[in-house]
Image: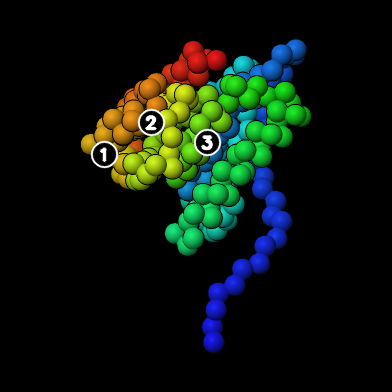
């Protein structure tokens, strides 16, 4: 007889933290940034710090699934990339993502006086739909959600998702080989079913974080702080 069983163990999750150099006697907004498939916390931190400037705490999280990916360096043909989920028992990956974000919020609220009323969640590519799932499952956990070059959950009609007070910003690129403009332009109406403050913008470029969007994202966040 064969059967599937499961055992559990404590696993470490890693993230990078950037704290503004200026002194602040009050609580600071917190920007939580998640990289895309095959990225890592260091690559996403560079983008997130450009958005945050000296006005916010930044936590750049690293996906729990690591794997070898091709490298352009002929002297080193392999590097480690990270992802957020796989198709195998994907609901467990979603739960792990939700718990990780909530734990980081808790840690930084206590250790660095992060303002839990001004938390913004930004994800690139694979992380987008996961972030939307978190926001729509737990209304009030974040002040805003920024999705860049990614998708939205395919089951937004599911009653498990709730109306949220958070603002939503979706950024797309016109030459994205994975998410066409025709597809991403339909996200606006779908997101408005669950959020009243929804913004959508497109930039020229392929499936990559459009650096030209950084000043707009920064202003969008500060306008909602």
Task: Using the rendered image of the protein, determine whether residue 189 is visible from the camera's viewpoint.
Answer: yes
Drawn side of residue 41 relative to residue 124, left or right? right
Question: Relative to residue 224, is residue 60 drawn left or right?
Answer: right
Q: Which residue is mark 2?
A: 194
Q: Crowding at label 2, few (<14), some or many (≥20) Cα neighbours within 10 Å?
A: many
Q: Earlier in the sequence, mark 2 or mark 1?
A: 1
Q: CA distance from mark 3 to mark 2?
A: 12 Å
- Please state which of the two labelled residues, at mark 1 or mark 3, is closer to the viewer: 3
Tell me what residue is drawn at x 49 percent, y 34 percent.
135
Q: Which residue is mark 1?
A: 183
Quadrant where the C terminus is found in the figure: top right
Q: Nearer the viewer, residue 173 or 146?
A: 146
Q: Which residue is mark 3?
A: 138
Residue 79 shows in this picture: no
Q: Are marks 1 and 3 in contact (CB under 8 Å)?
A: no
Q: Nearer the viewer, residue 55 or 46?
A: 55
Write the residue at 34% across / 25% down.
201
Q: Is residue 104 above or below residue 57?
A: below
Residue plotted at (58% across, 49% down): 96
Q: Label 3: how many residues lie within 10 Å, few (<14), some (14-19) or many (20+)?
A: some
Quadrant in which the N terminus appears:
bottom right
Whether the residues at callouts 2 and 1 have beta carbons within 8 Å, the answer is no
The outermost residue toward the front is: 159
Q: Disc 2 on helix, strand or loop?
A: loop
Q: What is the x, y in percent for residue 66?
A: 57, 56
Comparing 27 with 74, the one in front is 27
Q: Residue furthest bottom?
A: 1
Q: N-terminal of the two: label 3 or label 2? A: 3
Q: Is residue 130 above or below residue 109?
A: below
The image quadrant that residue 8 belongs to is bottom right
């Amino acid at each position: 007889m064969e059967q599937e069983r499961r055992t559990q163990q404590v696993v470490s999750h890693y993230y990078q933290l950037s704290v503004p150099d200026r002194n602040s006697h009050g609580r600071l907004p917190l920007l939580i940034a998640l990289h895309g498939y095959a990225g890592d916390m260091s690559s996403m931190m560079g983008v997130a710090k450009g958005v945050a400037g000296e006005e916010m705490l930044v936590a750049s999280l690293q996906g729990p699934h690591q794997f070898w990916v091709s490298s352009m360096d002929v002297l080193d043909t392999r590097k480690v990339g990270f992802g957020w989920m796989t198709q195998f028992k994907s609901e467990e990956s979603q739960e792990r993502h939700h718990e990780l974000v909530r734990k980081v919020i808790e840690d930084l609220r206590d250790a660095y006086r992060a303002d839990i009323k001004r938390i913004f969640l930004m994800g690139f590519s694979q992380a987008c739909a996961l972030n939307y799932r978190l926001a729509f499952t737990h209304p009030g956990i974040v002040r805003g959600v920024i999705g860049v070059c990614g998708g939205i959950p395919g089951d937004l009609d599911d009653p498990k998702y709730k109306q949220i007070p958070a603002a939503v910003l979706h950024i797309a690129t016109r030459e994205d080989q994975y998410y066409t403009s025709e597809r991403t332009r339909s996200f606006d109406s779908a997101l408005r079913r669950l959020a009243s403050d929804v913004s959508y913008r497109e930039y020229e470029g392929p499936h990559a974080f459009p650096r030209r969007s950084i000043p707009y994202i920064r202003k969008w966040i500060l306008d909602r702080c």
